[in-house]
Amino acid sequence: MLQAVIFDFDGVITDSEILHLRAFNKVLAQFDSKIARKDYYKKYLGSTDIEVFESLVKENKLNPGDMGLEGLVQQKSKIFKKISTAEGKIIEGVRDFLKMLKQNNVRMAICSGALLAEIELILTTAQLRSFFDVIVSAEQVKKGKPDPEGFLLTLAKLNETTSNPISADQCVAIEDSHWGLQAAKAAGMHTVAVTNSYDAEQLKIAEKIVTKLSEISIEELQEICG
């Protein structure tokens, strides 16, 4: 029985993946380094900011020096906030999908590798914050996707707010990357993929694949949960 829908954020609710790449590259420019778009989508998209910078250091593409990795994360976050305030947008169909879930008393949460301040800024600006009972962001986990830690923490936090416990198999996770789908499956949740960042072939481990959320009815979500 469907009880909750847990959303990834970037690439599912907001069309911001390319904005993250631009913010990373603005930071990296001071080191004469850059992430190519194809590499970002192939290697880094499912990672938290700190994991991206750690990977670049390991690949000898970055030496943060005295600034440190945390300093780079803060710098990137400031740049992203500025870009997203001017250019960030909610993906078509999301608002109506959220309203449908609310009308059917389905709990909603976000499990994202983005920073909390970035998520809150975009949701508040779009007047969508009230739909979500729980937000789990990069700062709250030790391991990003495909590790299931974030989804398990999201479920635990949802259960702190209800007297009727929700089990993992009563949750549908909506993701745009194979990293996220792997994490949700490892947490024991059902999965829906949207082809906003990758094509259907790369998301085939999902139980259902759509091009936009407006393609999914409440009946289909309930059927996925059995």
Image: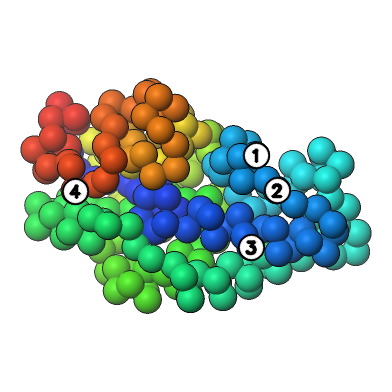
Which quadrant holds residue 26?
bottom right
Name the residue rendered at 51%, 53% in the picture: 17
N-terminal-most mark, 2 or 4: 2
Q: Is residue 191 above or below residue 77?
A: above
Viewport quadrant of the N terminus = top left
N-terminal-most mark, 3 or 2: 3
Which quadrant holds residue 133?
bottom left
Callout 1–callout 2 Cβ contact below 8 Å: yes
Instruction: Report x, y in % for residue 136.
Output: 45, 54
Q: Residues within 10 Å of mark 2 (few under 14, many from 20)?
A: some
- Which residue position holds label 1? 39
Instruction: Report x, y in % for residue 170.
Output: 23, 36
- Which residue position holds label 4? 214
Instruction: Report x, y in % for residue 108.
Output: 27, 53
Q: Residues within 10 Å of mark 1 (few under 14, many from 20)?
A: few
Q: CA distance from mark 3 to mark 4?
A: 30 Å
Circle number at residue 23: 3
Three-letter amino acid code at disc 4?
Ser
- Which residue position holds label 2? 35
